[in-house]
Image (spheres, helix red, strand yellow):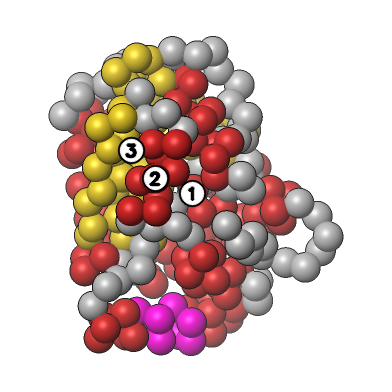
Amino acid sequence: MTQVTPYNSGESKKQQVATMFNNVAPTYDFLNHFFSLGIDKLWRNKLVTLIGRSNPKWILDVATGTADLAIAETKLNPEKIIGIDISEKMLAVGREKTKRFPVIELQTGDGENLNFSEDTFDAVSVSFGVRNFENVNSGLSEMRRVLKPGGKLFILEFSKPANWLIKNIYYFYFCNVLPFVGKLISKDARAYTYLPESVRQFPDGKKFIDLLQLAGFKNTECIPLSFGISTIYIAEK
């Protein structure tokens, strides 16, 4: 898998990703909803509906960012939601947003080296975070480790549309409009050019299902959303 990094700093991808999200944290929520025209909320709601089918009591939200998904997961009335992220500034925004949700606990944490015992969680979720892992295989293995037997992994991630017209509109927007506006508002010139680059190299669809199965997951599912602009992956331990 080709390694795409936010910067050419010589640091590890993990360190660069943490720096990038620290840089964009103040404007992240606004730009996220602005660029997706609010569709990202619909995608998360779909993901939460699917998570709710297994009635999880303990949920781990990896790469939680500003905790949008963790907050949406409170609708499921779990006993505990733990959100982890490597970006302290993203977590700082998330902590302000989650003050009225005592079920949520946000921690600094690395999705590729989880600080939890095996067989801890009923469900693990990741929303637009797996692309940013330095080692995707390690991250998948770690998330499987902390799941209880029969527990499920739920991943929402950008993917590449198959339809020629949709794909061309999508890439024009992603590679031209998004970086231009993102640079103006976030003041980080690379953050919103890294995004389309990371989406292009990410092994989506069947290739990602293969990675899930290689990590030991079973009963894998792949659910394209919005003409394949994003995809939900479900896998069971």
Residue on which disc 1 sits:
129
Residue 107 % position (x, y): 57, 29
In-front residue for pair 73/137? 137
Residue on which disc 3 sits:
154
Q: Is residue 142 above or below residue 62?
A: above
- Examine the structure image and report whether residue 179 is included in the region drawn in magenta: no
> What's under tag 3, amino acid-wise?
Phe
Give the residue drawn at x 50%, y 14%: 118
Please say if the residues under marks 3 and 1 sit with CB atoms less than 8 Å apart.
Answer: no
Crowding around mark 2 (Cα neighbors within 10 Å: few <14, some 14 to 19, many 20+) is some
When asked about the image quadrant of residue 227, the answer is bottom left
Q: Is residue 144 above or below residue 231?
A: above
Q: CA distance from mark 1 to mark 2?
A: 18 Å
Q: Element type at marker 1?
A: loop
Crowding around mark 1 (Cα neighbors within 10 Å: few <14, some 14 to 19, many 20+) is some
Q: CA distance from mark 3 to mark 1?
A: 12 Å
Quadrant in which the C terminus is drawn: top left
Q: Element type at marker 3?
A: strand
Give the residue drawn at x 38%, y 15%: 148
Of marks 2 and 3, the one in the foreground: 2
Q: Earlier in the sequence, mark 3 or mark 1?
A: 1
- Examine the structure image and report whether residue 174 is included in the region drawn in magenta: yes
Residue 103 % position (x, y): 38, 22
What kind of secondary structure does the magenta stretch mostly adopt?
Answer: helix
Q: Earlier in the sequence, mark 2 or mark 3?
A: 3
Q: Is residue 175 above or below residue 106?
A: below
What mark, if any, has residue 33 been given in the picture? Answer: none
Residue on which disc 2 sits:
210
The region drawn magenta spans: 170-177
Q: Element type at marker 2?
A: helix
